[in-house]
């Protein structure tokens, strides 16, 4: 089985909420590259997506770490307000209607939300300048 990388604990994301993280992904040539992702929760299920709007590729949380629309029901793009389902990442309204967020495979392991099947840069924690103050995450091999 692929290595698991712990992103956060399950209790850190409430039902119906979305959290953003900036990980470091290893490029083909081994160079690290910041990789913003988001993890949403619906009941006891967790869903991972790349934090990039299919419309113009920009981060969805242009409003200071805020991912949800004003009613708090859907993931929304802060730029042009496309809205996406929390579980499928499907865009049902907005400029990218019919498209979807790029999914990321998650594994829940003993109360940890983990990534698998991706090549992350091995670092002792992450020290990424982050103008939008998305919570940083410590990557630890499981
Ligand atoms: S960049 Fe997200 S809706 Fe346009």
Image (cartoon, helix red, strand yellow):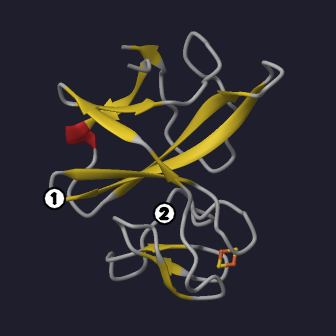
Q: Position of residue 88 (x, y in %)?
A: 39, 67
Instruction: Say if residue 129 shows up in the picture.
Output: no
Mark 2 or 1, closer to the camera: 1
| Horizontal relation, residue 67 to residue 123: left or right | left
Q: Is residue 19 shown above or below 113?
A: below
Examine the image and state in which quarter residue 6 appears.
top left
- Of 137 and 120, nearer the camera is 120
Residue at screen point 48% across, 20% down: 139
Task: Determine which residue is flagged by label 2.
Answer: 66
Residue at screen point 55% across, 16% down: 125
In 3D space, how far apart are the residues under numbered discs 2 and 1 (Cα atoms)? 20 Å
Q: Quadrant of ligand 1?
A: bottom right
Q: Secondary structure at mark 2?
A: loop
Q: Secondary structure at mark 1?
A: loop
Examine the image and state in which quarter residue 105 appears.
top left
Q: Position of residue 54 (x, y in %)?
A: 66, 69
Q: Position of residue 111 (x, y in %)?
A: 19, 30
Numbered circle sitting on residue 43: 1
């Amino acid at each position: 089985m692929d290595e698991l990388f712990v992103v956060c604990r399950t209790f850190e994301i409430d039902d119906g909420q979305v959290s953003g993280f900036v990980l470091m992904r290893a490029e083909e040539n081994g160079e690290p590259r910041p990789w913003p992702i988001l993890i949403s929760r619906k009941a006891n299920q967790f869903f991972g997506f790349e934090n990039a709007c299919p419309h113009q590729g920009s981060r969805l949380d242009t409003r200071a770490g805020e991912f949800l629309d004003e009613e708090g029901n859907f993931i929304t793009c802060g730029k042009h307000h496309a809205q996406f389902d929390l579980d499928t990442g499907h865009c049902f309204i907005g400029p990218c209607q019919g498209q979807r967020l790029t999914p990321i495979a998650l594994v829940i392991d003993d109360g940890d939300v983990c990534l698998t099947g991706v090549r992350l840069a091995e670092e002792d924690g992450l020290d990424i300048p982050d103008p939008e103050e998305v919570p940083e995450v410590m990557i630890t091999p499981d």
